[in-house]
């Protein structure tokens, strides 16, 4: 177990939250809520309070792509050996890039290590917090995903479903 924790701390989750320990910013979410696209930074930056304050009036998790050490068994997506979120992203979401994006965390990324190119060509569309998630994003996020279920319920209620 000690060895696994050490290994996980060297592996980064590309879908982390800004408040996680040792969080770092590796991209910006651009575009529209319906058609988000990650703009990858040339250099990964620590998610310092000063950096996160640059998000202005919106929450940092809405516009920054954040990576942090994989929580392993502390994460609801981890099944003991694999990240189920990475598997669902690959199985459910369409590829949105023809080539590998210019991502600076790839060498340490859990999704890359586990799913390879298939995860990377889907990664640019990933957002941590989405006002109006698509059905596919909700399914990929998994049951009880933070924010997605509530947002999907609000979306369905406003649409009269």
Image (spheres, grey):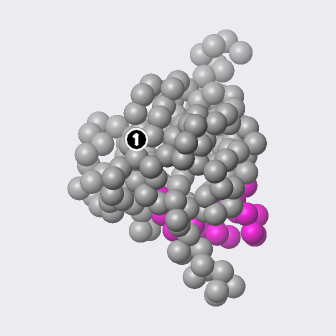
Q: What residue is shown at x 40% (from left), y 46% (from top)?
A: 40
Is residue 80 on the magenta stretch?
Answer: yes
Left or right, residue 127 beside residue 116: left
Q: Nearer the viewer, residue 113 or 88?
A: 113
Residue 142 visible, this angle? no
Locate residue 17, reporting x and y percent: 47, 54
Q: Which corner quadrant of the image does residue 139 belong to?
A: top right
Q: Which corner quadrant of the image does residue 157 belong to?
A: top right
Query: Neighbour class for label 1 at 10 Å: few (<14), some, many (≥20)?
Result: some
Locate residue 44, reporting x and y percent: 36, 59
Q: What residue is shown at x 66% (from left), y 21% (from top)?
A: 156
Left or right, residue 52 beside residue 140: left
Q: Quadrant of the N terminus?
A: bottom right
Left or right, residue 95 beside residue 80: left
Locate residue 80, reporting x and y percent: 75, 69
Magenta region, residue range: 67-85
Locate residue 118, reporting x and y percent: 67, 47
């Amino acid at each position: 177990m000690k060895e696994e924790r050490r290994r996980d701390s060297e592996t980064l989750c590309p879908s982390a939250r800004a408040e996680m320990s040792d969080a770092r910013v590796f991209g910006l979410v651009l575009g529209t809520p319906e058609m988000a696209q990650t703009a990858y930074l040339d250099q990964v930056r620590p998610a310092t309070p000063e950096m996160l304050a640059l998000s202005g009036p919106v929450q940092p998790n809405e516009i920054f792509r954040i990576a942090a050490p994989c929580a392993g068994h502390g994460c609801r997506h981890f099944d003991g050996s694999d990240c189920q979120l990475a598997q669902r992203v690959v199985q459910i979401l369409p590829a949105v890039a023809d080539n590998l994006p210019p991502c600076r965390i790839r060498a340490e990324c859990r999704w890359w290590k586990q799913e390879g190119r298939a995860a990377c060509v889907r990664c640019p569309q990933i957002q941590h917090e989405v006002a109006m998630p698509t059905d596919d994003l909700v399914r990929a996020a998994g049951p009880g995903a933070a924010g997605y279920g509530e947002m999907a319920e609000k979306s369905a209620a406003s649409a009269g479903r």
